[in-house]
Amino acid sequence: MTVGGWSEFHTLTKDEDILFKEVMGNIYGVSYKPIVVSTQVVSGMNYCFICRATSMTNPPAEFNAEVYIYKPAGRGAKPYCTAIHQMTM
């Protein structure tokens, strides 16, 4: 992979699944189920997860979403969500 370039989308590895759950575990109102992910090497790592999202409304609304997570380089640095975008067809 080229530094700064995005990888092809692929199914999540165990570590990517753990990272997603760690970051998104405190998001309320919408549940996100990751389907595939692409990564980008920067001063750390960017992740773009394509997810199936379900709102916690009555009735629930389902849609596809892009969830972006940044994992800083360095020991003890905590990853965090940088953006969530609803995908339109």
Image (tube, rainbow, N blue to C red):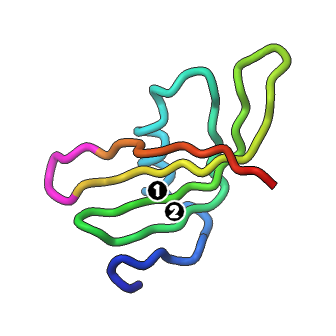
Residue range in magenta is 73-78
* Kind of residue indicated by mark 2: Thr
The residue wearing badge 1 is 16
Total marks in image:
2
Q: Residues within 10 Å of mark 2 (few under 14, many from 20)?
A: few
Residue 65 placed where, x, y %? 65, 47
Residue 74 belongs to the span the image colors magenta? yes
Relative to 47, does residue 26 appear above or below in the rendering?
Answer: above
Q: How far apart are the two marked residues, 1 and 2, measured between alpha carbons?
A: 5 Å
The quadrant of the image that shows the N terminus is bottom left
The quadrant of the image that shows the C terminus is bottom right
Which of the pair 89/73 is nearer the observer? 89
Seen as rendered, the residue at the extreme top is: 58
Residue 48 falls left or right of residue 52: left
Which of the pair 62/83 is nearer the observer? 83
* Kind of residue indicated by mark 1: Glu
Helix, strand or loop status at disc 2: loop
Q: Main secondary structure of the magenta part?
A: loop
Residue in the picture at 57% in, 77% down: 8
Residue in the picture at 47% in, 45% down: 83
Residue in the picture at 63% in, 38% down: 32
**Image quadrant assignment for residue 28:** top right
Q: Return the mark for residue 13.
A: 2
Seen as rendered, the residue at the extreme left is: 75
Helix, strand or loop status at disc 1: helix
